[in-house]
Amino acid sequence: MTLLATGGCASTQTAENANPDDPWEGFNRKVFAFNDVLDRYALKPVARGYRTITPDPVETGVGNFSPT
């Protein structure tokens, strides 16, 4: 009888609760994937182009700019 009563307490872990420490894991993975694609195909080429066409003194000036 005790075995029957405690059998209901045993359960399998679902994919949704795979890591209870991070309930946002699925959302975070999707955001990371989006950011990775955005960086690879849009932001990196723009940064490389900027670095190629911008003279070094201008890059230094932009890098030194600090809003107060």
Image (cartoon, rainbow, N blue to C red):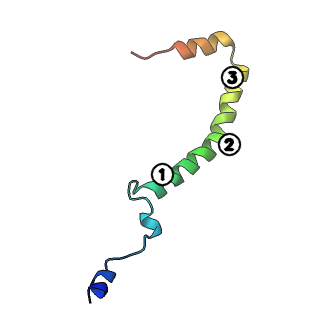
Q: Amino acid at mark 1?
A: Asn
The residue to which callout 2 is attached is 41
Residue 7 in the image: state x and y as whole percent: 33, 82
Q: How far across and down, in percent of the image, does residue 63 sit?
A: 55, 16
| Disc number lying in front (1 or 2) | 1
Where residue 54 appears, as percent x and y from the top left, is 68, 18
Horizontal placement of 50 versus 2: left or right? right
Q: CA distance from mark 1 to mark 3?
A: 31 Å
Which residue does the image show at 44% across and 66% down from the upper left?
A: 16
- In this view, the residue farthest toward the bottom is 1
**First along the sequence among labels 3 and 2:** 2
**What secondary structure is marked by label 1?**
helix
Of the pair 36 and 11, the residue shown nearer to us: 11
- Furthest toward the top, the residue is 57
Residue 40 image-quadrant placement: top right
| Quarter of the image with the C terminus in it | top left
Task: Determine the image quadrant of residue 18.
Answer: bottom left
Instruction: State the residue at coordinates (70%, 28%).
Output: 48
Three-letter code for the amino acid on which mark 3 is drawn: Arg
Q: Position of residue 15 (x, y in %)?
A: 47, 67
Is 18 placed above or below 9 here? Answer: above
Q: Is residue 25 above or below residue 64?
A: below
Mark 1 sits on what residue? 28
Residue topped by disc 3: 51
Mark 3: which secondary structure?
helix
The residue sitting at 57% across, 49% down in the picture is 34
Amino acid on which disc 2 is placed: Tyr
Q: Quadrant of the N terminus?
A: bottom left
Q: Residue furthest right?
A: 52
Of helix, strand and loop, which one carries label 2?
A: helix
Residue drawn at x 41%, y 64% as measured from the top left:
17
- Label 2 neighbourhood size at 10 Å, few (<14), some (14-19), many (20+)? few
